[in-house]
Amino acid sequence: MRGLLDSHCHLDDPRYVDREGVERRRLEAGVRVLVPGVRPWEFDRLRHDGGARGWLIGLGFHPQFIPSGLMEFPFQLLGKILRHESAGAQAIGECGLHRPNPTPMPDQLALLRLHAEAARKHDLPIVLHCVRCHHILPGFLAEFIARNGPIRGVIHSYSGGAGLVPVYEKLGLHLSFGGLITWPTATRPIAALRAVRPDRLLLETDGPDQPPYLPPPPDLPQLQRADLVDRRADRSRVAQSEPSMLPMIAAKAAELRSVALPEFLEQLDANAAALGW
């Protein structure tokens, strides 16, 4: 096996103050990583850092980082960048749909279409972000595929619920889950995790966000322990998520799916390889 893949981590995020320490712990844990781009003006730096550190990278424009007044942003320039300057990238994205968002949905969809076209042109997987838009994304993807042909990719930090899992699988997508599945109160993500076909599953940290759950210290009074779990407020013990935490997330995912860990890790590796990662 080539090493467990963190399929979504923003290692270039300035919130990682001790990036060298994060990188050292990642390498010690044997974790590979895909770092998705979120702003076009940062692509050159991401290419440089990815090449120097052995990251897989994606090139994309995150819907939450669209400047106010999208029509002022040069659509044609972004399309050109994605179509002609994807050298060194292993994915297109992070891109997608997000609500609430000051950018109107038609503009978000137009931007997503540019990414999907680039993914088709370069035969690269697309890394999709979808928050409170699962009533829109499947229809958009189905229409795009009908007109342009199939695309490969992953919905990162999947939040669509178990019922939509087969819909996205039929569209040819993988679904990725992060540290949220380690939280005792995360019933919806856990149900979705269990519903995914073995060959369509990926894992991520979404670092520095989505820190995994760690049980309260054993000497904490029982009432306070329960309060921490219910409010999911025990985040001070893991301030940020990082790739070295992925083995913990993988162990929990295997347990939740009732699969032996070695078999589970082999399947994850095969799933990543299917996307060229």
Image (tube, rainbow, N blue to C red):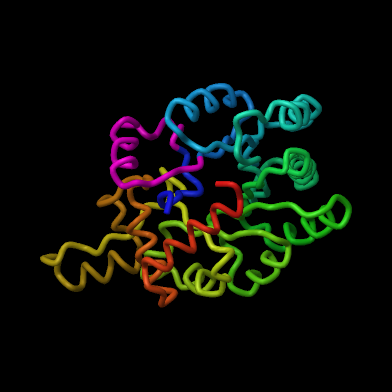
- Please say whether residue 50 is visible from this viewpoint: yes
Q: Position of residue 122 (x, y in %)?
A: 73, 38
Q: Position of residue 113 (x, y in %)?
A: 78, 44
Q: Is residue 84 magenta?
A: no
- Please say whether residue 72 is visible from this viewpoint: no
Q: Residue furthest left?
A: 219
Range of magenta residues: 11-34
Q: Residue furthest bottom?
A: 258
Q: How many marks?
A: 0
**Of 143 and 120, the residue lying toward us:** 120
Q: Is residue 180 left or right of residue 60?
A: left
Answer with the quarter of the image where residue 20 lies. Answer: top left
- The residue sitting at 80% across, 60% down in the picture is 142
- The residue sitting at 40% across, 69% down in the picture is 254
Answer with the quarter of the image where residue 63 lies. Answer: top right
- The residue sitting at 63% across, 58% down in the picture is 132
Q: Is residue 13 magenta?
A: yes
Q: Residue furthest front?
A: 1
Q: Is residue 205 left or right of residue 67?
A: left
Q: Residue furthest right?
A: 147
Up/down of 167 relative to 212, above or below: below
Up/down of 104 relative to 201, above or below: above
Q: Position of residue 27 (x, y in %)?
A: 33, 40
Answer with the quarter of the image where residue 217 lies. Answer: bottom left
**Of 100 and 180, the residue lying toward us:** 180
Up/down of 277 relative to 82, above or below: below
Image quadrant in which the N terminus is located: bottom left
Q: Is residue 16 left or right of residue 12?
A: left
